[in-house]
Image (cartoon, rainbow, N blue to C red):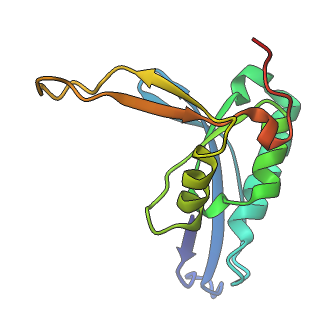
Amino acid sequence: MTVAVPLGRLGLPAARFVLCILSVHLGQAAVPIRWSDAPETGDGNGDIALGRTLIVEARKVLTPTALALLLIDRGFLDGAWLTEQARQGTEIIIGLQEDMHAYADLVGLSGLPDTVWEEVPAPQNHRDPPPSRQVARIPRSRAGTPAPSS
């Protein structure tokens, strides 16, 4: 997130900062536990660097269970970083739009031979008969970690 600070009354210059917040989910609330800020550089990568640093710092003080699942912004799409998180046991959920390349990548991965399709409950939309619904589970081995044995 980018924050703009107006010209200060003591002559301090106006400035723009990037801000990254790591929150935990407690019941119905997201509670910020760590945050970091830095002057905006204009290259668009400041929040990504801050976010990565926050995760490294959080791994030092939080249990692996606390970092088992990350919900991240689309701006953090980076294959190498996502792979690193998967190797450390963290699953990641990213909101995607249909026009994003990652969407096409996921559609392609879903068709590979070792992708497992699982039946899940149909949505409660009161249609008769209810539609069938399946989700693709892409094996962790694609993320550089061994797939769990059955």
As displayed, is residue 56 above or below residue 132?
Answer: below
**What residue appears at the point 65 percent right and 37 percent down from the top-left corner?**
138
Counting every numbered tag in the picture gives: 0
Q: Nearer the viewer, residue 34 or 110?
A: 110
User: Left or right of 19: which side holds 26?
Assistant: left
**What residue appears at the point 66 percent right and 59 percent down from the top-left corner?**
76
Q: Nearer the viewer, residue 14 or 130?
A: 130
Farthest-out residue, front: 113
User: Left or right of 102: which side holds 97?
Assistant: left
State the image coordinates of residue 109 (x, y, percent, origin top left).
Answer: 63, 49
Q: Nearer the viewer, residue 5 or 94?
A: 94
Res 150 quadrant in image? top right
Farthest-out residue, top: 150
As displayed, is residue 14 above or below residue 31?
Answer: below
As displayed, is residue 82 above or below residue 46?
Answer: above
State the image coordinates of residue 134 (x, y, percent, origin top left).
Answer: 43, 30
On-image quarter of the N terminus: bottom right
**What residue appears at the point 12 percent right and 28 percent down from the top-left corner?**
127
Res 36 quadrant in image? bottom right
State the image coordinates of residue 30 (x, y, percent, origin top left).
Answer: 50, 34
Q: Nearer the viewer, residue 125 or 44?
A: 125
State the image coordinates of residue 92 (x, y, percent, origin top left).
Answer: 64, 40
**What residue appears at the point 36 percent right and 30 percent down from the top-left corner?**
133
